Image: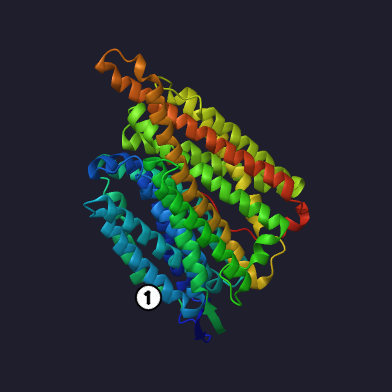
């Protein structure tokens, strides 16, 4: 059963022509920075947090996936709630809830509290993010001003990841890993107070229904799938517990599809997915997230535990990746109308696959400059070339009443892909490490050799995970080449949405 609500148009209490609209942009920009920043800031702090709270290798991925899974799984529902209950109201609630969740995570004394706080951050972020984007649209109605506003929003979406990595390193190095979470609380509270004064209220007209069964089955199904992957790393793939969780996940996700096909107000209209070009873009986004998010996790541990980098140095070492994405996006923007999305996406994803394969060459004694940096540059350039055409293709030919869903779905698929991929790759990593130690333990003649074996086994696990990531991104290149057929002129006319990692 769907839940109904009735909404009427409420005039904004801040005129779009008022000078306050630029202050509203500042508030919205801060909210976007928080969302992007918190997706990456904890990566650098993860090794320290894992040691402090005694988190197992199998469960450490929940510090990342709890956030991305809640955010991606609830993003479409969050957009609907914001549209029909009031975007300003949803925006402020999202900010305050995000602040409370951040404080809870920063003060966590055990892994369970930390993971719950990260999930709450994602849930409130899923309410805040679509509300912010809608408020931006209704606040800036003149074409030139709207372009400037979305330019600021997109720049923050692209650069926020770099800020998160660098800030995470600084806070972990000179304060505590807890401040990577605590720092968001006062910022979100100040933004909420400013939103009360400077952001205008608006909401959609007419009656609507919230697809709560669809939201429940999709979110719980994805959580069950991630937990099934986690149990596989602990108990094995043939464990009855693992199998039970994976079967439950499949049943819930199949139920979600059935509900969406039959619902009069679906959370995710299947017509948005079933178009060949859009479907190709969404599948590529899902696989990119699956392959890319785990790479950040393992590369962070490699830098800090194998190369001996500090948290700050690890953050700095990731900056070339962000600069490469910006450079690749600039190249794609210049040549998209000449080559079209199919060639750019396929070429960009193949380049990213090559970069990921280059990461499999790392070893215990290899250097960042010779093995990690070149791979970062190649991988990030490929991703930068891909993101722009992918977002435009995702909106190709979509009806006006489905534009919001299609826009949100790019970020949704990337976040969900990141959640599933990180959990799966972490399971593959732990299995590869255990298998390597078992196969080579007979070569150990002195107990003092065990730490060295553990170090080699750990790096072996990283390389196995990178090979799987390369396969996932390579598959996305194949799907882009096979499915995307839109002409370059048609896709060039479609609006883009800010995407990135």
The residue shown at (34%, 67%) is 97
- Residue drawn at (61%, 63%) of the image: 406
> Based on the displayed image, in which of its 4 quarters is residue 232 positioned?
top left
Report which quarter residue 262 is drawn in. bottom right
Q: Is residue 10 above or below residue 434?
A: below
Q: Position of residue 456 (x, y in %)?
A: 38, 23
The residue lying at 72 percent from left, 50 percent from top is: 483
Relative to 185, does residue 463 appear above or below in the rendering?
Answer: above
Q: Where is 362 relative to 103, above or below?
A: above
Residue at the limit of the structure toward the front, as seen here: 240
Q: Is residue 494 visible?
A: no
Mark 1 nearby-residue class (10 Å; few <14, some 14–19, many ≥20): some
Along the line of sight, the residue nearer the viewer: 439 or 121: 439
Q: Is residue 435 visible?
A: yes
Taking the image as shown, residue 463 lies to the left or right of residue 186, namely: right
For the image, the number of numbered tags is 1
Q: Is label 1 in a helix, a strand or a loop?
A: helix
Q: Position of residue 112 (x, y in %)?
A: 28, 54
Q: Is residue 481 left or right of residue 89?
A: right
Instruction: Indicate left or right for 345 with 246 as reference.
Output: right
**Residue 270: where, in percent of width, then height?**
64, 65
Residue 394 vs residue 215, the one in the foreground: 215
Left or right side of 491 for 461: left
User: Where is mark 1, residue-wise?
Assistant: 196
Give residue 322's position: percent from left, percent from top. Answer: 49, 42
Of 274 and 156, nearer the camera is 274
- What color scheme is it? rainbow
Residue 486 placement: quadrant: bottom right
């Amino acid at each position: 059963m769907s839940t109904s609500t009735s909404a009427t148009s409420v005039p904004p209490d801040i005129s779009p022509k008022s000078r306050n609209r630029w202050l509203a942009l500042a508030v919205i920009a801060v909210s976007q920075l928080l969302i992007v920043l918190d997706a990456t800031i904890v990566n650098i702090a993860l090794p320290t947090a894992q040691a402090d709270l005694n988190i197992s290798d199998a469960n450490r991925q929940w510090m990342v996936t709890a956030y991305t899974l809640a955010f991606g799984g609830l993003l479409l529902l969050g957009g609907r709630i914001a549209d029909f209950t009031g975007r300003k109201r949803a925006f402020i609630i999202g900010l305050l809830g995000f602040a409370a969740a951040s404080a809870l995570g920063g003060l966590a004394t055990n892994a369970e509290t930390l993971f719950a706080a990260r999930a709450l951050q994602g849930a409130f972020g899923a309410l805040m993010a679509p509300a912010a984007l809608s408020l931006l649209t209704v606040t800036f109605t003149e074409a030139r001003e709207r372009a400037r506003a979305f330019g600021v929003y997109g720049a923050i979406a692209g650069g926020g990841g770099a800020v998160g990595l660098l800030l995470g390193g600084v806070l972990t190095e000179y304060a505590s890993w807890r401040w990577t979470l605590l720092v968001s609380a006062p910022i979100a509270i100040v933004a909420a107070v400013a939103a009360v004064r400077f952001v205008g209220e608006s909401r959609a007209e007419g009656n609507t229904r919230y697809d709560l069964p669809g939201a429940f089955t999709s979110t719980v199904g994805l959580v069950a799938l991630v937990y099934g992957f986690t149990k596989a790393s602990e108990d094995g793939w043939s464990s009855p517990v693992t199998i039970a969780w994976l079967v439950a996940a499949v049943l819930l996700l199949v139920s979600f599809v059935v509900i969406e096909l039959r619902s009069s107000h679906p959370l995710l209209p299947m017509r948005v997915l079933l178009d060949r070009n859009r479907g190709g873009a969404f599948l590529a986004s899902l696989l990119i997230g699956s392959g890319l998010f785990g790479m950040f996790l393992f590369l962070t541990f490699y830098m800090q535990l194998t190369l001996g980098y500090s948290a700050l140095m690890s953050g700095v070492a990731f900056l070339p990746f962000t600069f490469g994405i910006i450079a690749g996006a600039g190249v794609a923007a210049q040549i998209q109308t000449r080559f079209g999305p199919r060639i750019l996406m396929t070429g960009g994803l193949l380049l990213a696959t090559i970069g990921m394969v280059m990461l499999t060459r790392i070893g215990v004694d290899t250097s960042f400059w010779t093995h990690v940096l070149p791979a970062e540059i190649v991988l990030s350039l490929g991703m930068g070339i891909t993101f722009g055409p992918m977002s435009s293709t995702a909106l190709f030919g979509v009806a006006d009443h489905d534009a919001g869903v299609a826009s949100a779905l790019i970020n949704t698929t990337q976040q969900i892909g990141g959640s599933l991929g990180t959990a799966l790759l972490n399971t593959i990593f732990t299995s590869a490490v255990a298998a390597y130690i078992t196969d080579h333990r007979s070569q150990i003649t002195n107990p003092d050799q065990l730490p060295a074996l553990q170090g080699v086994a750990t790096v072996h696990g990283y390389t196995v995970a990178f090979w799987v990531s390369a396969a996932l991104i390579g598959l996305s290149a194949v799907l882009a080449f096979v499915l995307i057929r839109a002409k370059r002129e048609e896709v060039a006319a479609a609006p883009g949405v800010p995407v990135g990692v």
